């Protein structure tokens, strides 16, 4: 089996590993190769997985996304549109790999280029192909005008036409979530409703956390391992696996002194991730800077409060651990601003913060301190998503 895991953030890697482990449980003789890029390869290496050597030939999607970003601003739809050269290169790497090895199953977790070019060249499909995603539908950001609305609708229309014309390309379509997690919006003028179309065409695994919510004993042990006692109020700050989150980290660092003036026992653990150098950030009293942290979900569960970007995985991990948190979606990032926000509203989890508000250190400090000890009224995050996804996929082996 060949697993393709999107490199845009680390959330795909965590859930894909969980699904892979359940597939091995169902098929002990299963061999899994991974065609992946940094930072996903970092996670896979830590897990002892086999990364296909051809992964070295892939062009970096993360680097492209970072090059397209501004100050906590990423016009992600436009960035995807400008990625044609990378997409063609990476599809050709994929094509060479599957030509050399007769895989029984290919799983693409938001492997957009593979899905697109297989639909355009259906004769190249000689294996079972399963598609995983946690959102459906490109959506325009309102302040970007009519042109973006027309383009997103055109992209959606092309996808709908591809699916209608070549249904055999995706042998399984698995949505990582539930029907209520899908936005109740239109694909565009004259096009179907996104939720209705997705419910009619996808299977639903429920959310895939890749872990069970840690027990109180595990949380206490994690705090000890991090070096924080019970007398400390711990705020963890994280911006995911890409390098676009540095401006938010700097905003939080500016807010540390006024936050600690309000709550002296408050300490900050700032996790920069694998693509931001911790030494590039200023040293601030009461702050520990770390780069990549394995099992970050367990460290997050040990926090009293958190500040994060609007990525789905980190926010849902905090929701599952029932930790109060602020989330700051990247501006013009339709997935974080619309799809993820909609899902978090369903779970009644987290408090959304606009980046413009976070520019004021005093305002942000007050928002962080107010979250400490606040009642968490979010709904429980279901478990068993990895098992359900694996049960759907194993039928293709």
Image (cartoon, rainbow, N blue to C red):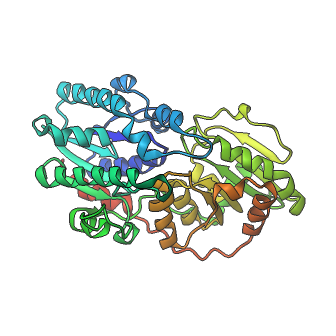
Compared to 300, does 192 lie above or below?
Answer: below
Q: Position of residue 302 (x, y in %)?
A: 67, 58
Vertical position of residue 238 compared to residue 97: above or below: below
Quarter of the rendering containing residue 364: bottom right
Write down the quadrant of residue 282 in the picture. Answer: top right
291 horizontally vs 317: left or right: right
Q: Image point 38% across, 63% down: which residue?
A: 177
Comparing 351 with 172, the one in front is: 351
Left or right? Give the position of 333 relative to 161.
Answer: right
Residue extending furthest toward the front = 146
Relative height, residue 339 to residue 34 (above, below): below
Where's residue 316, x and y in %?
A: 52, 61
Whether residue 288 sits left or right of residue 321 in the image: it is right
Residue 265, percent from left and from top: 86, 59
Q: Name the spot of residue 178 as percent of width and height, x first.
A: 36, 68
**Res 30 seen here:** no
Front one among 270 and 327: 327
Q: Do we see residue 205 in this rendering? A: yes
Which of the image's four quarters has the N terminus? top left
Residue at 51% across, 36% down: 68
Which corner quadrant of the image does residue 303 belong to?
bottom right
How many marks the image carries: the answer is 0
């Amino acid at each position: 089996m060949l697993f393709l895991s999107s490199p845009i953030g680390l959330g795909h890697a965590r859930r894909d590993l969980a699904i892979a482990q359940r597939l091995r449980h169902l098929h002990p003789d299963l061999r899994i190769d991974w065609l992946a890029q940094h930072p996903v390869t970092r996670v896979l290496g830590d897990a002892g997985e086999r990364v296909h050597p051809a992964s070295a030939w892939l062009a970096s999607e993360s680097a492209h996304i970072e090059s397209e970003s501004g100050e906590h601003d990423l016009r992600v739809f436009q960035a995807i549109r400008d990625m044609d050269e990378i997409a063609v290169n990476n599809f050709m790497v994929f094509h060479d790999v599957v030509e050399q090895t007769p895989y029984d199953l290919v799983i693409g977790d938001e492997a957009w280029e593979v899905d697109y070019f297989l639909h355009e060249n259906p004769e190249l499909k000689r294996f079972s192909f399963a598609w995983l995603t946690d959102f459906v539908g490109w959506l325009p950001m309102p302040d970007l005008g009519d042109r973006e609305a027309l383009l997103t609708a055109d992209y959606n229309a092309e996808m709908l036409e591809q699916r209608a014309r070549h249904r055999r390309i995706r042998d399984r379509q698995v949505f990582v979530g539930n029907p209520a997690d899908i936005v109740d919006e239109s694909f565009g003028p004259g096009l179907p409703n996104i939720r209705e179309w997705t419910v009619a065409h996808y299977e639903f695994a429920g959310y895939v956390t890749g872990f069970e919510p840690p027990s109180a004993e595990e949380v206490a042990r994690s705090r000890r391992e991090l070096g924080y006692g019970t007398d400390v109020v711990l705020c963890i700050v994280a911006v995911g696996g890409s390098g676009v989150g540095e401006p938010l980290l700097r905003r939080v660092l500016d807010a540390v002194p006024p936050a600690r003036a309000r709550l002296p026992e408050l300490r900050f653990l700032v996790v920069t991730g694998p693509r931001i150098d911790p030494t590039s950030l200023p040293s601030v009293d009461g702050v520990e800077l770390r780069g990549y942290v394995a099992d970050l979900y367990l460290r997050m569960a040990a926090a009293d409060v958190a500040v994060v970007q609007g990525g789905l995985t980190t926010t849902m991990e905090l929701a599952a651990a029932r930790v109060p948190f602020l989330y700051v979606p990247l501006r013009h990032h339709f997935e974080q601003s619309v799809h993820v926000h909609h899902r978090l509203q369903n779970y009644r989890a987290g408090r959304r913060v606009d980046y413009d508000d976070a520019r004021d250190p005093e305002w942000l400090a007050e928002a962080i301190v107010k979250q400490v000890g606040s009642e968490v009224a979010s709904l429980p995050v279901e478990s068993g998503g990895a098992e359900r996804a694996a049960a759907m996929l194993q039928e293709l082996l």
